[in-house]
Image (cartoon, grey):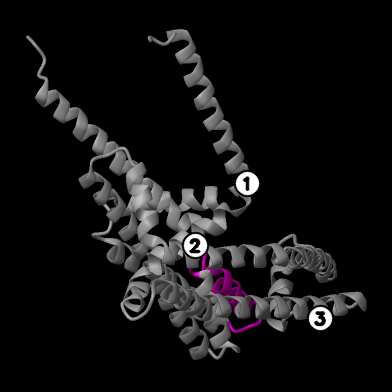
């Protein structure tokens, strides 16, 4: 019995529409957890070599549980402790600043800055020092109110952050436990030959692992150098600020400059001009150059992208995905290049098999 073509076409349309609705609703359900799930996948790929060694000595379930525990112990807990210390110091600084401003007292300016301003006022049409103090007082009040508001906003979102963290660790456990099955499922979904599937998956895995390990190594080097420089210059809390720079170094372009640049400017403003200039020079010439020197060397051989594409993919990834874009940006760029290369190779092969008739 021959089916009605119109009825068959309508059934196919209804079927694909139903599938589209199901996947749309599924996306709406998963959308709040996409970032934690992506982080779980990135962490799973990064720590899978360690998990594979543990798996050779115990069951997959226990190996996944132990690997997840080690990730929590070595990465998550130090990050949470450092973030808590930063929030505590921010609250202390805000309370002290608001206490000074609440008493109606103007902040005490360094003597060198006062003398420099008086000399400049004698030669240039600048406002008097009292007006400058009043402007500085108003600016500090606004800055204190802004920072206090931002700190309160961060505190109000701590519950959501902890939920995302729990989802990430929970998903990490299952990614490690069921890693081979998930990889096989992804491989079967890819519309390529087996060789190209394995090559693309291998390239993606290597790029994720290289991106994460390179970022961590570069951040560790920058933070260590920053802490050593702070200690050599006699800046208090060199160890703490070295740890802060290590975590901030994971942010490309600005990273450690969020710590050493304001410190250098403050040293020069308080009269320690030599220390400020030295810190400024070492910040730009040593700490800031580590990323530009080490990252291309460590990433070489793991991707066909040049430095320009790598830089654009990282910045573009951060603009779209946030901090996760440090990893996802290069991965998406490399995947797009691989797909384009596969398409061009298929097109050339098709032309060789079916040459044009002249």
Q: Position of residue 53 (x, y in %)?
A: 32, 77
Q: Which corner quadrant of the image does residue 271 belong to? A: bottom right
Which of these two is toward me, 164 or 317? 164
Q: Position of residue 351 (x, y in %)?
A: 14, 24
- Determine whether label 2 and label 3 are within 8 Å by CB: no
Residue named by callout 2:
40
Q: Which mark is residue 96?
A: 3
Residue at the image position 30 percent from the left and 62 percent from the top: 299
Dot 1 corresponds to which residue? Answer: 29
Q: Earlier in the sequence, mark 3 or mark 1?
A: 1
Examine the rendered structure and indicate whether residue 111 appears above or below residue 291.
below
Q: Is residue 190 covered in magenta?
A: no
Against 275, is 150 above or below?
A: above
In the depicted structure, whether residue 300 falls above or below residue 305: below
Q: Earlier in the sequence, mark 2 or mark 3?
A: 2
Q: Mark 1 falls on what kind of element?
A: helix
Between the C-alphas of marks 2 and 3, the distance is: 40 Å
Q: Residue at x 72, y 72 (%)?
A: 117
Region rendered in magenta: 249-272
What element does badge 3 sit on?
helix
């Amino acid at each position: 019995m021959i089916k009605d073509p119109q009825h068959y076409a309508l059934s196919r349309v209804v079927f694909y529409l139903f599938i589209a609705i199901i996947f749309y609703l599924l996306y709406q359900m998963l959308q709040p957890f996409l970032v934690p799930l992506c982080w779980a996948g990135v962490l799973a790929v990064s720590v899978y070599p360690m998990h594979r060694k543990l798996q050779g000595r115990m069951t997959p379930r226990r190996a996944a549980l132990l690997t997840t525990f080690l990730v929590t112990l070595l990465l998550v807990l130090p990050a949470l402790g450092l973030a808590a210390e930063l929030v505590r110091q921010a609250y202390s600084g805000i309370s002290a600043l608001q206490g000074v401003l609440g008493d109606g007292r103007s902040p005490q300016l360094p003597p060198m800055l006062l003398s420099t301003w008086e000399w400049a006022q004698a030669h240039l049409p600048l406002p008097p020092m009292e007006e400058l103090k009043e402007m500085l007082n108003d600016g500090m009040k606004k800055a204190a109110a802004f920072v206090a508001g931002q700190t309160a906003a961060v505190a109000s979102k701590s519950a959501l952050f902890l939920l995302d963290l729990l989802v990430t660790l929970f998903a990490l456990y299952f990614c490690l436990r069921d890693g081979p099955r998930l990889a096989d499922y992804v491989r079967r979904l890819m519309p390529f030959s087996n060789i190209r599937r394995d090559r693309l998956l291998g390239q993606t895995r290597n790029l994720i692992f290289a991106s994460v390990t390179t970022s961590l190594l570069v951040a560790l080097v920058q933070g260590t150098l920053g802490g050593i420089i702070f200690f050599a210059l006699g800046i208090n809390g060199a160890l703490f600020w070295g740890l802060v720079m290590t975590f901030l170094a994971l942010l490309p372009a600005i990273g450690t400059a969020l710590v050493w640049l304001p410190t250098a400017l403050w040293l020069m403003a308080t009269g320690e001009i030599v220390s400020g200039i030295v810190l400024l020079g070492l910040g730009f010439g040593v700490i800031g150059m580590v990323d530009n020197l080490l990252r291309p060397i460590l990433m070489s051989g793991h991707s066909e992208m040049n430095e320009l594409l790598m830089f654009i993919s990282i910045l573009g990834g951060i603009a779209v995905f946030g901090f996760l874009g440090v990893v996802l940006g290069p991965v998406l760029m490399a995947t797009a290049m691989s797909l384009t290369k596969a398409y061009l190779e298929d097109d050339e092969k098709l032309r060789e098999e079916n040459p044009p008739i002249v």
